[in-house]
């Protein structure tokens, strides 16, 4: 039976003190994953003696613009991401992904920080955050460190977060002009589904119609969300008027399998990820052509 | 395991209770406060039967520990009726036959109420999005949407 002491606080400082003072502390924020695991007594739950509720720390619920970065508090819910003009105007790909999560009830509680720290292979926000080159700020009583999100993730449900650290900020650099993005997701049904496969794409298209700075990250495709450098290289330098989508999609399929190896799901996922990259590129190309 | 003393508002009344560290909001509502209108279906946030309104937002009460909600305001299906008069939404559910077995109804009402509190004239699409986390096994969605639309169009 799972048994623990419940701790709660409204201050970051106090939360850090708890993390410092006690060992085997599990953090609770929106609870949309943790309470399911608690109810099911899931083997995925690590052994813990204390449950530290951080859901009412106001400092972790702020979104603002600072020095060309949008800074997002880890307690920002998926619903806030959808309705926040700073996100809508700067990172529509993040908004689109947030909208595909769970249901209204889940989006009203689940948080961006939880999605990151939980580090599920199917986490809907990780592919867009990776393509946006997000960074995470980790704070402990000893100080702060900032890591690129892609470096922070180390495996399925694994991150570099230390026991005494709290995720205190997500920082996303603003994109310049002429950037385009798209998010694709396939689930068993539209609402309340875990991604069978997803893909985020962010790219610049210059005045001559050439792809630059392309970033591609799939979800539920690799052991944990990560970018696909071969695909990115293949798209960069291509013209929106001549790009061979069939060729690109083959590279993406191959690249995914080079990371995962052949699995039982490969006969489905390899052609399907090819479709997702094609759909995303097609959408962006059409958008770029209309903007010309 | 420590117990926690917690104070919050339920249907306009302040309550102070001792709750266990594993006690979920649905447990507190049903077991301690005897507000059994809120139903427990799947217990994992997928069916919406346990939906209540927490600080103005529809949430699954099976996915919240009561220890988390000190100072918050909870509205349950019992709080919709005022002075013996049904909420217009409840009356609309009756008028449109938007109920069969009734198990999903409290959750449907609370999801719809949360929507209408923020958006008094939602589109059909917005109604569907608000209800996407509520399952009805009697497949009465059409009447439910019509009931909500009848309020939205007023």
Image (cartoon, rainbow, N blue to C red):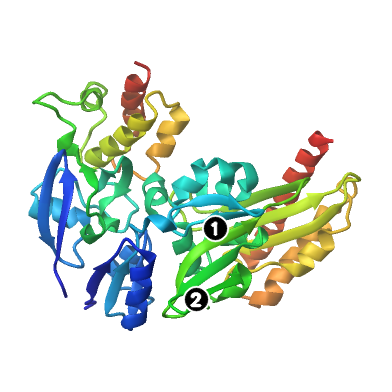
Q: Secondary structure at mark 1?
A: loop
Q: Secondary structure at mark 2?
A: strand
- The answer to whether residue A100 is seen in the rendering is no
- The answer to whether residue A28 is seen in the rendering is yes
For marks 2 and 1, give the CA distance.
Answer: 27 Å
Question: Is A69 above or below relative to B54?
Answer: below
At x 23%, y 21%, the residue is B95
Q: Chain for mark 1? A: A
Name the residue nearer the viewer: A288 or A22.
Answer: A22
Question: Is A1 above or below relative to A203?
Answer: below
Of badges 2 and 1, nearer the viewer stands 2
**Direction from residue A61 to residue A154 in the image, left or right:** right
What is the quadrant of the N terminus of chain A in the image?
bottom left
At x 32%, y 27%, the residue is B143
Q: Residue B2 location, x and y as percent?
A: 15, 72
Q: Residue A182 location, x and y as percent?
A: 67, 49
Disc count in the image?
A: 2
Q: Quadrant of residue A246?
A: bottom right
Q: Chain for mark 2? A: A
**Direction from residue A277 to residue B62 in the image, left or right:** left
Tags 2 and 1 in contact by the CB under 8 Å rule? no
The residue under label 2 is A143
Q: Which mark is residue A125?
A: 1
Q: Residue A136 location, x and y as percent?
A: 56, 67
**Direction from residue B133 to residue A264 in the image, left or right:** right
Name the residue nearer the viewer: A233 or A276.
Answer: A233
């Amino acid at each position: 039976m799972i048994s623990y002491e419940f701790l709660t606080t409204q201050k970051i400082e106090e939360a850090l003190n708890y993390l410092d003072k006690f060992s085997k502390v599990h953090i609770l924020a929106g609870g949309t994953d943790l309470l399911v695991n608690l109810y099911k007594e899931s083997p995925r739950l690590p052994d813990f003696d204390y449950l530290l509720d951080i859901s009412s720390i106001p400092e972790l619920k702020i979104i603002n613009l600072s020095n060309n970065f949008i800074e997002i508090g880890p307690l920002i819910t998926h619903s806030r991401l959808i309705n926040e003009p700073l996100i809508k105007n700067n990172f529509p790909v993040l908004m689109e992904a947030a909208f595909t999560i769970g249901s209204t009830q889940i989006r009203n509680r689940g948080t961006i920080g939880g999605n990151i720290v939980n580090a599920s292979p199917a986490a809907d926000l990780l592919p867009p955050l990776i393509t946006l080159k997000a960074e995470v700020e980790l704070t402990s009583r000893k100080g702060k460190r900032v890591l690129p999100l892609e470096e922070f993730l180390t495996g399925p449900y694994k991150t570099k977060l230390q026991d005494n650290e709290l995720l205190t900020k997500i920082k996303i650099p603003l994109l310049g002009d002429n950037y385009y993005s798209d998010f694709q997701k396939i689930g068993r049904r539209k609402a309340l589904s875990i991604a069978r496969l997803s893909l985020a794409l962010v790219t610049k298209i210059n005045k001559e119609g050439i792809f630059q700075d392309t970033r591609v990250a799939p979800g539920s495709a690799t052991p944990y969300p990560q970018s696909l450098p071969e695909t990115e290289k293949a798209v960069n330098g291509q013209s929106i008027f001549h790009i061979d989508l069939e060729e690109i999609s083959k590279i993406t399929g191959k690249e995914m399998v080079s990371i995962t190896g052949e699995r039982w799901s490969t006969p489905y996922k390899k052609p399907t990820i090819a479709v997702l990259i094609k759909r995303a590129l097609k959408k962006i190309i059409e958008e770029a052509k209309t903007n010309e | 395991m420590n117990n926690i003393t917690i104070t919050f508002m339920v249907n306009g009344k302040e309550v102070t209770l001792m709750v266990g560290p594993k006690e979920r909001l649905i447990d507190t509502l049903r077991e301690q406060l005897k507000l059994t209108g809120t139903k427990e279906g799947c217990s994992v946030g997928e069916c919406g039967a346990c939906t209540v309104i927490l600080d103005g937002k529809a949430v699954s009460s099976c996915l919240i520990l009561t220890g988390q909600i000190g100072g918050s305001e909870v509205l349950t299906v019992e709080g919709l009726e005022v002075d013996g008069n049904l909420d217009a939404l409840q009356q609309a559910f009756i008028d449109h036959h938007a109920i069969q077995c009734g198990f999903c109804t409290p959750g449907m009402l609370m999801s719809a109420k949360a929507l209408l509190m923020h958006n008094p004239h939602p589109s059909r699409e917005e109604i569907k999005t608000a209800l996407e986390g509520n399952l009805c096994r009697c497949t009465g969605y059409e009447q439910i949407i019509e009931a909500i639309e009848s309020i939205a169009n007023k």
